[in-house]
Amino acid sequence: MGASLSPDSNKLFTYNEPMTRLDIVDLEKLEFLDSLPFEKEGPNGIGPRGILRTHVTDSGEYYFSVFG
């Protein structure tokens, strides 16, 4: 859950729920690129609900859909 391809299908963005982070994988080189940590609680937290899907825009920005 929480995975999406970049618009050019070269990168995989996947939400790692146990670690509360977004992992980015280069699918052309088959290598791990980056890991972006998130807070689960607090003013900048993503909240207690699970991530349903990661969305990636054409400009490379990302946002999440959550369970309602």
Image: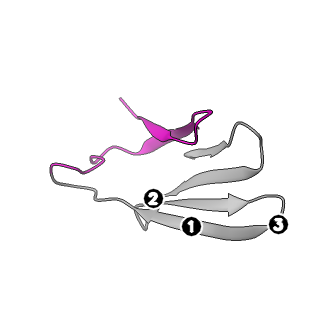
Quarter of the image where the C terminus is located: top left
What residue is at 67 percent from the left and 70 percent from the top?
A: 32
The picture places residue 50, in percent across and down from the top left corner, at 40, 45
**In the displayed structure image, the side of residue 30 where residue 32 appears, left or right:** left
Q: Which mark is residue 29?
A: 3
Amino acid on which the number 1 mark rests in the picture? Asp
Query: Is 57 in front, or is 42?
Result: 57
CB within 8 Å, label 1 to label 3: no
Q: Amino acid at mark 2?
A: Glu
Q: Is residue 46 magenta?
A: yes
Identify the residue shown where x is 79% and y is 58%: 27
The span picked out in magenta is 43-68
Q: Position of residue 43 (x, y in %)?
A: 15, 49
Q: Which residue is painted at 53% across and 38% down in the image? A: 53
Distance in Å between CA atoms under marks 1 and 2: 16 Å
The residue labelled by disc 1 is 34
User: Which label's residue is closer to the chain start, 1 or 3?
Assistant: 3
Q: Nearer the viewer, residue 55 or 68?
A: 55
The residue lying toward the viewer, choosing from 37 and 17, is 37
Q: Circle 1 sits in a helix, a strand or a loop, which is it?
A: strand
Q: Which residue is mark 2?
A: 17
- Camera-near label (2 vs 3) is 3
Cα separation between marks 1 and 3: 13 Å
